[in-house]
Image: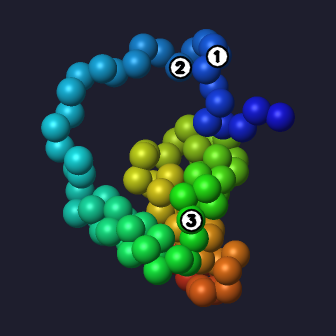
Amino acid sequence: MARMNDIGGMEGFGPIDTTDDTEPFHADWEARVFGLFNALRAQGVFNTDEFRNAIESMPPGEYLAASYYERWFHAISTLLERKGLIKPGELDV
């Protein structure tokens, strides 16, 4: 079964924006999510495959509505909950 990240060849998503954006983060919270990802991965809390799987497991509507770093935050929250390091919903905003 194809998951949301595997939308190649599907129509209706509009053109791909190919402008070169030199800014890695557009808000402070994005840089914090990036740092959190690196710290947790370095500590062995999760690995890259688990992280990718958590993003790809997002419900399609949520995946399509989320920005790049919103998907990262979702994955981090999901993995921390699965591993019992936080309570379900503890990081909900």
Please state, as top left, top right, bottom left or bottom right, where the N terminus lies in the image.
top right
Q: Residue at x 56, y 38 (%)?
A: 64
**Residue on which the image places disc 2:** 13
Nearer to the camera, 83 or 14: 83
Verify CB contact (< 8 Å) between mark 1 and mark 2: yes
Look at discs 1 and 2 and give the one toward the viewer: 1
Question: Compared with residue 62, is residue 45 higher up or lower down, i.e. above or below?
Answer: below
Give amino acid for label 2: Phe
The amino acid type of the residue labelled 3 equals: Asn
Q: CA distance from mark 1 to mark 3?
A: 30 Å
Q: Amino acid at mark 1?
A: Met
Q: Looking at the image, can residue 27 be seen?
A: yes
**Disc sitting over residue 10 in the figure:** 1
Please state the horizontal and vertical placement of residue 5, each as a whole percent of the image.
61, 36
Say which element carries label 3: loop
Residue 61 image position (x, y, % from top left): 64, 41
Q: Which residue is mark 3?
A: 47
Q: Position of residue 16 (x, y in %)?
A: 40, 19
Left or right of 3, for residue 77? left
Q: How many numbered circles does the render carry? A: 3
In what element is the residue under mark 1?
loop
